[in-house]
Amino acid sequence: MSYAGDLSPQEAWAKLEEGAILVDVRTEGEWAHIGIPDPAARIATANDPLFIQWNLAGGVPNSRFLDELLRQAPEADGTELVFLCRSGQRSIAAAIAATQAGYTSYNVLEGFEGEPDRYGERTVNGWKNRGLPTNLGKN
């Protein structure tokens, strides 16, 4: 594995309680229409999540992802980053890239929405379906 590891949503929550920073790598559309994680709703000392798209509209890779991460995240000085996407796939790629840039990086298994049920609805697991705090959309 070329990053620190995979975490369940609950394990990711524990990392945030310890001071890690959540990095949501979904698209602006996902943030606006599906919702965002909101650790500050329950952790008074939580770092604000970072919102940096891994892919831009139309699935085009964000060539500025690392530049944006380096600008927004503290220097790679031991601060742990926890990457989140819709289902836990884009966040793996982001965690690998961040690790190569010197960060300690984790991927959230199941992602924000989790896997689809037999009807295609994302109600099985994931951050929001595990009852972790969310907002309806990014302001």
Image (cartoon, helix red, strand yellow):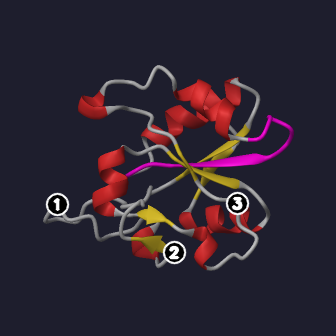
Report the Cα–Cα distance between label 1 and label 2.
22 Å
Q: Residue at x 64, y 67 (%)?
A: 13
Instruction: Give the number of the mark in front: 1 or 2.
Output: 2
Quarter of the image for residue 97 reads top right
* Residue 47, numbered circle: 3
* Residue 59 image point, x, y percent: 29, 30
Q: Residues within 10 Å of mark 3 (few under 14, many from 20)?
A: some
CB within 8 Å, label 1 to label 2? no
Tell me the amino acid under the disc marked 1. Gly
Label 2: how many Cα within 10 Å (few below 14, some 14–19, many 20+):
some
**Mark 3 vs mark 2: which is more N-terminal?**
3
Circle nearer the viewer, 1 or 3: 3
Which of the image's four quarters has the N terminus? Answer: top right
Residue 49 falls left or right of residue 77: left
Residues in magenta, as a range = 74-86
Q: Gap in Å between the C-alphas at discs 3 and 2?
A: 16 Å
Q: Cβ–Cβ below 8 Å for labels 3 and 2?
A: no
